[in-house]
Amino acid sequence: MKDIYLLAIETSCDETAAAVVKNGKEILSNVVSSQIAIHSKFGGVVPEVASRLHVENISLVIKEAMEEAKINYDGLSGICFTQGPGLIGSLHVGVQAAKTLAFVHDLPLVPVHHITGHIYANAFVDDIDFPLLALVISGGHTELIYMKENYDFQIIGTTQDDAIGEAYDKVARILGLPYPGGPEIDKLAKMGQPNYKLPIPKTDEKYDFSYSGLKSAVLQMINRLARNDEELVKADLACSFQEVAISQLWSKVEMALNEYKPKHFVVAGGVAANSRLRELFVEYMLAYPEITYTIPPLWCCTDNAAMIGASGYHGFIKGLRADESIGANPSLQM
């Protein structure tokens, strides 16, 4: 079969990224321009600022990715891009860049759902085996996805309110920690003990998640301590929050592993970089020696374009194409 070379573009939030990926597994280049230093001044991503920075950086990032891959547009098989979900202004920059390049160089366009990119990032580590169970955990998503084969996505569980990454950021803000909050909570929790009793959120649906109540419980705990003139040990509260947050994830994963009996289990998304989660999940998966599991390296967890290229490859093989009328879709369904 002829080799497939795809230029991939990712601009769903605050990372301007481009990559060239061969056959969905070999990364020829993977360039990311991060905006974290700028958004941290505001305590979170400012959509208008993110869009403007994407406009400034997109051409340079794509140029660098092509040069690093040592390939020209004649050598590409197509261009894939994140269509959604994400911030509408940010997505629009990447979509327009992809459409323009596809038109100028007469290349096919392959739209990619951002979350499928996170799942297929695991292909850079291990061969994907089916049936597969994926836990997708990020600032905007907490989902359990079952796949019988490539590009067959069945969402069996999702968040009823806050995503886990969103809850981490909100709790970090309550504790006066800088943005992004996830790594800060993870770091602080290492210095504490789970001495504060916090409730494990309950959900009506078997595989759904909920983090809004846990976030509120942290705030109530802080207020109660203040009312009673008791000392707040921030490290202990961060540790207590994290243990409950991760325990809810695992309780749902464990049920799904037992019911769906996948051959492969993968973790995907930014929260997969959490050190405590990685430690516990490796320990828990010892009970399932018959299931291959993949917890990707840190660079695979955060947003990048190589993962869009990995997913886009399978979309390309399946014949997924877009024309010049396609637009960004911030609420794109999988």
Image (cartoon, rainbow, N blue to C red):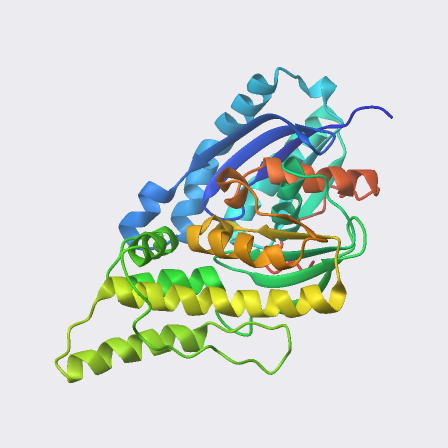
The one of 177 and 272 positioned closer to us in this rendering: 272
Q: Quadrant of residue 258?
A: bottom right
The one of 182 and 82 positioned closer to us in this rendering: 182
Number of disc labels: 0
Q: Quadrant of residue 245?
A: bottom left
| Drawn side of residue 237 relative to residue 144, left or right | left
Q: Which residue is pictured at 48% across the width and 33% down the height?
A: 32
Looking at the image, the residue that sits furthest to the right is 1
| Drawn side of residue 249 relative to residue 40, left or right | right
Q: Is residue 328 visible?
A: no
Query: Does residue 72 lie above or below 291 as drawn?
Result: above
The quarter of the rendered structure image containing the N terminus is: top right
- x then y, percent, for residue 84: 61, 52
Looking at the image, the residue that sits furthest to the left is 229
Q: Which residue is pictured at 29% across the width and 80% down the height?
A: 220
The one of 220 and 73 positioned closer to us in this rendering: 220
Q: Is residue 234 visible?
A: yes
| Drawn side of residue 196 relative to residue 281, left or right | left
Q: Which residue is pictured at 69% across the width and 26% down the height?
A: 104
Q: Which residue is pictured at 46% across the width and 72% down the height?
A: 211
The quarter of the rendered structure image containing the C terminus is: bottom right
Query: Does residue 259 lie above or below 151 as drawn?
Result: below
- x then y, percent, for residue 35: 39, 41
- x then y, percent, for residue 225: 20, 79
Query: Does residue 1 lie above or below 42 as drawn?
Result: above
The one of 87 and 128 positioned closer to us in this rendering: 128
Query: Does residue 266 lie above or below 226 as drawn?
Result: above
